Image (cartoon, grey):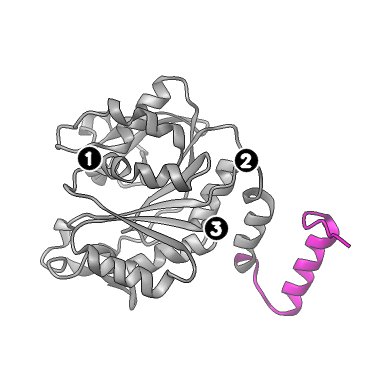
Amino acid sequence: MLIDRKSPNFIGVIFLVAANNRINIETLCPYLLNLFFMEGPHNIHTAIILAAGYGRRLAPHTYNTPKPLLSYQDKPILEYTFSALQATNITNCIIIVGHLGNQIREYATENFGDLFNLSFVRQDPINGSAAAVEQAKHKIEALADGYFLITASDYLLPRNYLSELMAFHKSGPQKISLSLRKLNKKDVTESSIVEYNENIVYKIHEKPSADLVPTDPLTSSLIYILPTTLLEYLPKIKYSERGEKELPSLINMMISDGILAKGLQQQALVNWETTYK
């Protein structure tokens, strides 16, 4: 007999078993998010992990160790990314490597090769997040079915962070979903702010001047869910003043063309980099 996993009776059994075994609701969250939102006609099974950068802000620590493999509380930062991915339905991971890329390839393959279908793309030169997508275009076309998730590899992600964003994406009509978080006003000029109202994102401003920063700014993390139609915009991208091809510029183009983007405000992330300064 088939059991409807979304029926009230089945869900009641889940909570009863959890209570009897003293499993807290936080542990159940990834399962419940998958149950309700991540199975459907537009599943997101492919993630891109951006891990090519030099990590210059943390030099000399990054001279011999790539930034994603620096440790926080005895775990490489990249392990937090993979832990968050394990709480989703992601099966394919395209890892963009560059600086000391062989170390990242060896670590990911040894520790997560049995859990994900891993593939690696070398970014050379290392010139921005949109350029990374450009170099991985053939793999995205082969693996992604409509949408893909992209994330930087140097965030200290809580276990449920990516599953929350994916559930948000599945629950709405938007084609683009962005992870938003509060940021200290003094730090925003080195990050980004969004024009945003009632979850709708109208524009991303990268590294804005101080006069553009509102009193209580929201920044867009480099964590997005994007449609594969974004690949059609790659030929239009131009280099920024910083000499990079940047994903926010592509997203702004798509928004200007009437493609709906929404943002989910998520919890602030631990600034682990201060332990290396």
What is the x, y in percent for residue 61?
15, 69
Q: Amino acid at mark 1?
A: Thr
Q: Quadrant of the C terminus?
A: bottom left
Q: Which residues are magenta?
A: 1-26
Q: CA distance from mark 1 to mark 3?
A: 32 Å
Residue at the farthest right position: 1
Is residue 124 shown in magenta?
no
Q: Residues within 10 Å of mark 2 (few under 14, many from 20)?
A: few
Mark 3 falls on what kind of element?
A: loop
Dot 2 or dot 1: first in sequence order is 2
- SS type, badge 2: loop
Q: Earlier in the sequence, mark 1 or mark 3?
A: 3
Give whichever of 176, 179 is nearer the camera: 176
Going from N to C along the chain, the mark reached first, 2 or 3, is 3
Instruction: Return the residue nearer the eye: 228 or 216.
Output: 228
Q: Label 1 crowding class (10 Å Cα cut-off): few <14, some 14-19, many 20+? A: some
